[in-house]
Amino acid sequence: MTDNTDLTDPADLEMPGAEYNEDDITTLDWKEHIRRRPGMYIGNVDDGSKFDDGIYVLIKEVVDNAVDEFVMGFGKQVIVEVTDETVEVRDFGRGIPLGKVVEASSRMNTGGKYDSKAFKKSVGLNGVGIKAVNALSTDFYICSVRDGQMKSVSYSRGEIVEERDIEPTSEPNGTLVRFTPDKEVFKGYRFRYEFVLQMIKNFSYLNTGLTFVLNGKRHVSRGGLLDLLRENMTVESLYEPIHLVGDDIEIAITHANQRGEEYYSFVNGANTIHGGTHLAAFKDAVARTMKEYFKKDFDVTDIRGGMIAAISVRVEEPVFDSQAKIRLTSRDVGPEGPTVAKFVGDFIKTDLDNYLHRNTDVADVILKKVQENERDRKAMAGVAKLAREKAKKVNLHNKKLLDCRVHLNDPKGDEEKKRASSIFITEGDSAAGSITKIRNVETQAVFSLRGKPKNSYGVPAKILYENDEFNLLQAALNIEEGIDGLRYNNVIIATDADVDGMHIRLLLLTFFLQFFPDMVKKGHVYVLQTPLFRVRNAKTAKKGARSKSSDNAETYYCYTDEERVEAIRKLGDNAEITRFKGLGEISPDEFRGFIGPDMRVDRVSLRKEDSVDDLLEFYMGKNTMERQNFIIDNLVVEDDTHLDSETLLDADE
C-alpha cells in the first residue's frame, strides 16, 4: 500500500511552541560559561571529601603556574597556605608582566605559554586554568611583582572588585594568588589537609630541587620518583628500587612480597591515577625487557606480580580523557615525535636492560620473585579455573549481585557517572533489600554477603577461589587479574553498626589489604556511615516521616552520641529514641538520604607508617597476649559485667 500524503505541506510540519529565532541565540561570557559548566574545566564540584574532587584541581591549576616558572629556571620556592576554605600560593618566579595581570587572570586564551616548546610540556596553562579558579571563587586576589613594582587585582566570581594601579614594593619578584571557592558551586566543601599534603609532596617528587612550604612545613625532594616510592610503600621492598632518568622520562621500579601490582603515573606533573597510554606502554615494555634479559617467555603476570613502580613523562600538548586529567589518551609525544609507546618502550629497553646487566644481584632477586609467582600461579590454575566456572553458574546478576548500568571500566561513557559508579557490599538480604529499593540503578550496585567471610590473613592466595564469598566478590568486582578491570570506582563496605557488623567489616578490609592493597592505595575502598540513632518528636512523628536536621525539624538522624544528646536536648520530653543496630532496621524511605548525594563515607587509606603486615598480624593474626591486653586497655564497660578469660577470648576472635 502506498501512502500519498504530501509531506511538504507546511501544516503537517509545524510543531506548536517550537519557535526558533534570533532571541534564542545567546553568547556566554568567559566566566558565565565556566560557572554553568564547571565540570568542563575542573571536573566535579563535590565537597572535598575525596582526593580527586574539583576543589583540589583549583589548587593544582595555581601551583602548576608556579612550577612552570621553576621549570623555566626562575624561583626555587613555592609557599602554600591552606585553611578549611581558602588557599594562598606564592611563587618567586618572574611574575606576570604588570600590564597583563588582568588579561592573564580573566581573559580566556591569554597566556605566555603557547610558543614555548618547554611550556608545551606543561598542563598549567595561563590560557584557561587560572581563569577557572577566578570564575569559581567568591574571592580571588592576584598580585604580580616585577623589579620593585607590583600590580594587584581583586575579583568576585570573575568580576573585578578592585584593580589597583602599579605601585612600588620591596617584595621579591613572583606571583601571589589567594582564592576562596564559591560555596554556591562547591556546596559544603572543606579542604582536607591530607589531600593537599599528598598533592604538594607529588609536586616535590616531580620537580627535584623545588622547595614547597605548606602551612609552614618544608617539602623538598632530591631523589624524585625514588623518594615517592619510598614514601608510599607500606611493605618492604625485595631490592633497592631501580631509578632511571632520561630526557622527559623518569621511572622507579621494585618488587615486594605482595599480591597484585601498584603503580604511580604522571604526565607533565598531572597525577594520572587511571593511567593511560604511557602507563600501558611502561607495563608492556618492562615485561618485554625482562623476558629478553632472562631469555625466557615468562607470563607477564608473573613478571609484574608484586611490582611497585612509578613513571613520569613529559609530552607536548597532552590529551586527557577528561578535564580532571587522570588518564592520558595521547598517542604521540609531540607533533614531530614518536608514539608514546615507542618513546617509553625504547627508553626502558635500553636503560632497564643496561641496569640489569650492571646489577646482576638485583636481577637475581627479580628472577627469584618471578619464578615464585610462576609456581604459585600454576599451583592455583586448576582451583582458579573451577572457581571461575562456578561463579558463572551461580548467575551473579540474579543471586549475589544487583548490578548498575554504568561501570568504571567502560571504554566510553559519561565520566561523571563512571566516577560515581559504586558497589555496596552488605551483610545479608535485609540490608541489601533496603538499599536495593532506593538505589540509583545507573551508578549503584549491591553485592550481598551470606554470613561472615573467612579470615584471609596468612592463608594462601587460593583462598580467593575456594571460598565462595571471596570468589564471587572478586568476580563481581572483576579484579581476578588485578584492578585494571575494576568495575566500580567506589567499593563501599556497608555493614551493621553492631559487633558482628564490625567484625565483617574487618574481615573484608583484611581481604582487600592482604590481596588487593592497590585498591586501597588508589582510593577505591570506603566504609559507609549510617546513623546510629533516630531521635524524633513522639507526638508529631508519623510512620515514614523524615525531615532535614534543622532547628525546626521533628526528626534527627544522629551519627554520634554527641549528636544524639543534642537532639534530645532540642526535643525535650517528647524525644523518642531508636537505636539502629542493623541496616535492615532502616526503612527504604529513610535510607534514601543515607546513600544519596549527602552520603557519608570514610575512605580507607594507608600511610607509610601503616605497615600492612604489622597491622594484619596484630589485629587478624593468631590470638596473642599482646592483643588481649590491648582489648582490656581499650574496652569500655558500661556496667559491672565480669570479664573472665573466656569472654576475652570470644571478643578477640
Image: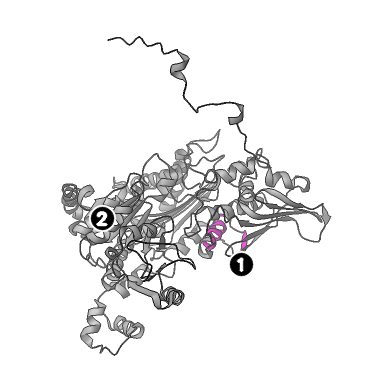
Classify residue 79 by image quadrant. Answer: bottom right
Label 1 amino acid?
Asn
Give yes or no for residue 202 being in the magenta stretch.
yes
Q: Left or right: where does residue 467 sit relative to residue 288?
A: left
On screen, residue 618 above or below 227: below
Looking at this view, is 21 or 501 the one in front? 21
Instruction: Tell me the CA gap for discs 1 and 2.
Output: 42 Å
Classify residue 307 by image quadrant. Answer: bottom left
Residue at left offset 75%, top offset 45%: 100
Q: Left or right: where does residue 374 sit relative to residue 359?
A: left
Q: Quadrant of the N terminus?
A: top left
Give yes or no for residue 104 being in the magenta stretch.
no
Labels 1 and 2: the sequence-earlier one: 1
- Residue, disc 1: 215
In the rendering, at what x and y percent does residue 8 appear?
44, 12
Label count reads 2
Looking at this view, is 211 or 512 the one in front? 512
Q: Quadrant of the C terminus?
A: bottom left
Looking at this view, is 626 or 296 the one in front? 626
Residue at left offset 43%, top offset 70%: 609
Q: Left or right: where does residue 100 sit relative to residue 333?
A: right
Label 2 amino acid?
Leu
Which residues make up the magenta segment?
196-217
Q: Left or right: where does residue 47 sit relative to residue 359?
A: right
Q: Secondary structure at mark 1?
A: loop
In the rendering, at what x and y percent does residue 58 appear?
58, 53
In the rendering, at what x and y percent does residue 228 appear?
49, 60
- Residue, disc 2: 473
In the rendering, at what x and y percent does residue 624 appear?
27, 81
Q: Secondary structure at mark 2?
A: helix
Q: Residues within 10 Å of mark 1 (few under 14, many from 20)?
A: some
Residue 14: in sight, yes or no? yes
